[in-house]
Image (spheres, rainbow, N blue to C red):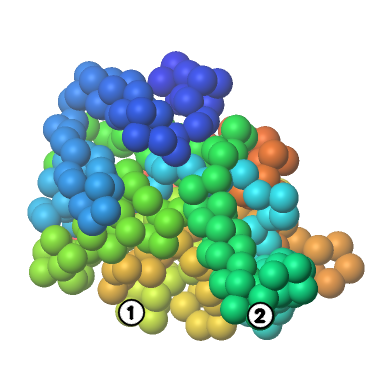
Amino acid sequence: MTELSETLLRDYQVRKSVRQKQDFIALIMPRIREMGYEVKTEKGSFGSRNILVGDPDRAKILFTAHYDTCARMFFPNFITPKSIPIYLLYNIVVVLGFFLISAAAGALFGFLFSAAEGALSAILVCYLLLMFMIFGPANRHTANDNTSGVITLLELMAALPPEKRREVAFVFFDWEEAGLIGSSSFAGKHRKSLKNTPVINFDCVSDGKAILFACSKKAGLLTDVLEDSFAPKGDYGVEVLSKGVFYPSDQMNFPLGVGVAALKRGQRTGVLYMDKIHTDQDRIFCRDNIAFLVEGSVRLCGRICAD
């Protein structure tokens, strides 16, 4: 990897506060200019700041990743993109846990004071738990979510042949962890120009050898070119799907959105899953994953930009 990527992985994994994000922006923008790219920031909703590299309104393909990082949680954000019922069940259990904690707090305050104060306490505790998920203490380890996606973009910028760079753009999204706010704002501002532009979004790509490309219905037209560009290699398996898959990330805001994730496969069940993110255990960073994705992305640019 480049020295910039190594520095980011070593010293800049926390990008949650305004100051931390500003430090990250100050680090990468001069280095991106040194590569020969034009780069700027674009303000969005709720104070978000997206980083734009190249001209997204003229690019034939757009590569993206969110650079903001999450609060530390006591349980992982467990995702099973191809097993949607399992994903829904897990989230239902989490929500029920919040309600049970809130209800217990409400019952205690209702017993000690009054029914009205108990109800108010339950609502307040539920609200505080939700806010803690978004605005709580920063997770100190974000190797997979989403330092891996950010580094994939930086490595791809460095690897892309000079003759292709004018036809490709990159965007680092802010506020993904708060509800895809940065990408939603960007999509609204560039809606017309991005109507037919493939958007390849890297989110959590360094922990797992099963590489999933979760495509929107319209992006299903890219299946063949994606499979040709990212052919399975060694231990890597690749699946390109536009049906029966759900991956919650920034690509969902774009007509031709493709979410890229690295997953593990259950030995007994065969279920593809992602774990550890949003917790202190998010420390796995496989450099081979990044190299695999960068090589495939360069081939993808060659195919799409040649059209």
Q: Locate residue 103, reporting x and y percent.
A: 71, 74
Viewer-side label of 1, 2 = 2
Question: Relative to residue 278, is residue 300 drawn left or right?
Answer: left
Q: Which quadrant of the rendered structure holds the C terminus?
A: bottom left
Whole-number angstrom distance, CA of label 1 to CA of label 2: 52 Å
Residue 6 visible in this rendered orientation of the protein: no
Q: Is residue 237 above or below residue 7?
A: below
Find the residue positioned furthest to the right: 268
Residue at (56, 39) in percent of width and height: 137
Q: Which residue is mark 1?
A: 218
1 or 2: tag closer to the N-terminus: 2
Nearer-the-camera pick, 14 or 170: 14
Nearer-the-camera pick, 138 or 257: 138
Residue 181 visible in this rendered orientation of the protein: yes
Nearer-the-camera pick, 180 or 268: 180
Choose top left, top right, bottom left or bottom right for residue 159. top left
Choose top left, top right, bottom left or bottom right for residue 31. top left
Q: Is residue 138 above or below residue 245?
A: above
- Disc 2 is placed on an element classified as helix
Residue at (14, 61) in percent of width and height: 190
Question: Relative to residue 10, is residue 270 drawn left or right?
Answer: right
Q: Amino acid at mark 2?
A: Ala
Q: Which residue is mark 2?
A: 115
- Disc 1 is placed on an element classified as helix
Q: Amino acid at mark 1?
A: Lys
Q: Locate residue 197, reporting x and y percent.
A: 22, 64
Choose top left, top right, bottom left or bottom right for residue 229. bottom left
Q: Are marks 1 and 2 in contact (CB under 8 Å)?
A: no
Q: Is residue 174 above or below residue 190?
A: above
Nearer-the-camera pick, 224 or 100: 100
